[in-house]
Image (cartoon, rainbow, N blue to C red):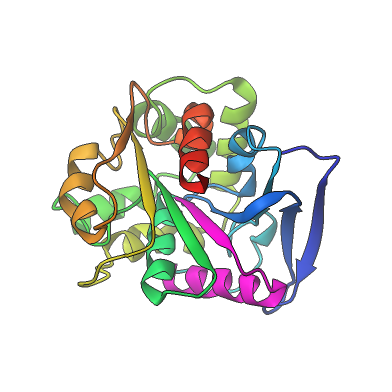
């Protein structure tokens, strides 16, 4: 994101204050929701490719600059935070861009049908109900994926990416993923990932983009579990050879998907 036109502001949803990163520009405001283990910085490669658009991002509760923010840290609380930020700022034309956990939070927002929501871009999103491999044993193993820099590095190499990240982005991921408390790091694996959002469809114009080699949210699982809830989305946009961390692995493709929703 162009730092010459990006400003930071604080908003008091509770204590401590939340830092918002706002970029002034044209069209609907792009509201970015990062993945479990990420931060607002995860979106910078994508934002750099959309310099003319209005954008809004923040570190989710418990992560990055908000590591000291008290719980709850679950997906409903994150959706509540997003609604509160938009309402407090008075923004009335928003496209929500959610990645992985942020994609499931975006689905919760869309099911609430806020008047300000104009579109969704779901980037390798967690589906509304968990796939069959989300077992208790899997959840417990996942809950330790970010315990140390070494476990994050292993997750990057073995699960999260299909292509090596540049050294600076790799270091950012490791710092983001290990910076939260143990309680925050465990909340999504033990609760959010297995949460079933229940029946319901999303009428908001939506584009879903996923990596061909995504081991976390494989295209086949999203076609089975997500697309039936999106009557306006005919299929997935699949990025050849990419893994789960699309904002870092394939920012050009993600930016192109956002432009398509913006029209």
Residue at 52 percent of width and 47 percent of height: 262
Residue at 51 percent of width and 57 percent of height: 96
Classify 157 as above or below 226.
above
Main secondary structure of the magenta stretch = helix
- Would residue 84 be counted in the magenta stretch? yes
- Relative image position of residue 162 (x, y in whole percent): 37, 24
Residue that extends furthest to the bottom in the rendered view of this protein: 14
Of residue 238 and residue 151, the one placed in the foreground of this image is 238
Classify 200 as above or below 234.
below
- Would residue 31 be counted in the magenta stretch? no
- Relative image position of residue 232 (x, y in whole percent): 29, 55
What quarter of the picture does the N terminus occupy?
Answer: top right
Of residue 105 and residue 132, the one placed in the foreground of this image is 105
Compared across the picture, whether 17 is left or right of 103 comes to right
Residue at 70 percent of width and 56 percent of height: 65
Residue that extends furthest to the front in the rendered view of this protein: 263
Q: How many marks?
A: 0
Residue 113: quarter of image:
bottom left
- Relative image position of residue 171 (x, y in whole percent): 61, 31
Compared across the picture, whether 199 is left or right of 56 comes to left
Residue 50: quarter of image:
top right
Q: What stretch is highlighted in magenta?
A: 75-98
Residue 168: quarter of image:
top right
Residue at 19 percent of width and 45 percent of height: 223
Classify 235 as above or below 61.
above
């Amino acid at each position: 994101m162009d730092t010459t036109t990006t400003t930071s502001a604080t908003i008091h949803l509770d204590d401590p204050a939340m830092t918002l990163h706002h970029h002034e520009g044209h069209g609907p405001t792009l509201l970015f929701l990062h993945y479990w283990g990420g931060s607002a910085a995860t979106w910078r490669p994508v934002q750099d490719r959309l310099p003319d658009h209005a954008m809004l991002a923040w570190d989710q509760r418990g992560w990055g600059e908000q590591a000291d923010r008290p719980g709850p840290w679950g997906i409903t609380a994150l959706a509540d935070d997003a609604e509160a930020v938009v309402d407090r700022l008075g923004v009335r034309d928003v496209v929500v861009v959610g990645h992985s956990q942020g994609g499931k939070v975006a689905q919760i927002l869309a099911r609430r049908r806020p008047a300000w929501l104009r579109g969704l871009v779901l980037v390798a999103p967690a589906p509304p109900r968990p796939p069959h491999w989300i077992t208790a044993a899997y959840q417990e193993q996942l809950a330790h994926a970010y315990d140390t820099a070494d476990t994050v590095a292993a997750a990057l190499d073995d699960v999260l990416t299909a292509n090596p990240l540049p050294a600076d982005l790799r270091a950012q991921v490791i710092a983001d993923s290990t910076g939260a408390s143990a309680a925050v790091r465990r909340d999504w694996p033990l609760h959010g990932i297995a949460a079933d959002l229940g029946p319901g469809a999303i009428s908001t114009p939506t584009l879903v983009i996923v990596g061909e080699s995504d081991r976390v949210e494989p295209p086949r699982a999203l076609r089975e579990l997500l697309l039936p809830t999106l009557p306006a989305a005919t299929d997935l946009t699949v990025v050849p050879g990419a893994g789960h961390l699309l904002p870092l692995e394939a920012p050009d493709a993600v930016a192109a998907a956002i432009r398509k929703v913006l029209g």
